Image (cartoon, rainbow, N blue to C red):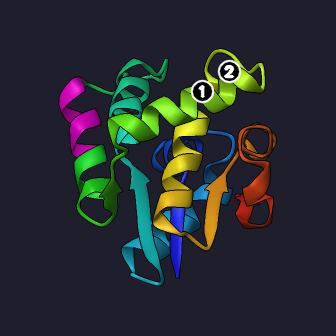
Amino acid sequence: MKILFDTSVIIAALVESHPMHQRAFPWLKKAKEHHFELIIASHTIAELYAVLSTLPTKPRISPATAWRLVHENIEAIGKIVSLTAAEYSSVIKKISERGLVGGITYDALIAKVAEKSKVEQLLTLNSDHFRRVWPEGEKIIVSS
């Protein structure tokens, strides 16, 4: 089985103080134990680093620690899937036609990776966002 993790799930799994940590961490643990194939959108790597390195936790997560968390917990165990320039363009066109703006763009890109990778599940803490950008994938969008 292939499962794509949204950025929200990974952040919650990696940050113990996150309010959704207890729900998300078991998913990451199962991925590390190879219970399924973990799929990650390539831009999620950058988004993870950006969020982890600026998260207002005490103590703050240093840039080196943020990189290590991403590398050891995601890159080392997941399959990173990139979109082509044409796929990026098609996603932007699709969301513009639906009148969607802002940060939901990144959810649309993750949904496109889920579709491209033919995952059985897209795991997220923001299922409503994904249903807006990818109503065709509603059956595989799962809340963590």
Indicate the quadrant where residue 102 lies. top right
Q: Residue 52, labelled with which disc?
A: none
Q: Would residue 67 be counted in the magenta stretch?
A: yes
Residue 92, compared with residue 20, is above or below; it is above
The residue type indicated by label 2 comes to Ser
SS at badge 1: helix
Q: Residue 93, labelled with which disc?
A: 1
**x, y percent for residue 49:** 33, 31
**First to last magenta residue range:** 63-69
Q: Is residue 92 left or right of residue 60?
A: right
Residue carrying label 2? 96
Circle 2/circle 1 CB separation < 8 Å = yes
The residue type indicated by label 1 comes to Lys
Residue 9 seen anywhere in this rendered image of the structure: no
* Depth check, front residue: 55 or 101: 101
**x, y percent for residue 48:** 40, 35
User: What secondary structure predominates along the stretch shown in magenta?
Assistant: helix
Q: In this view, does 66 lie to the left or right of 112?
A: left
Query: Which residue is found at the position 54% from the left and 48% from the top?
Result: 112
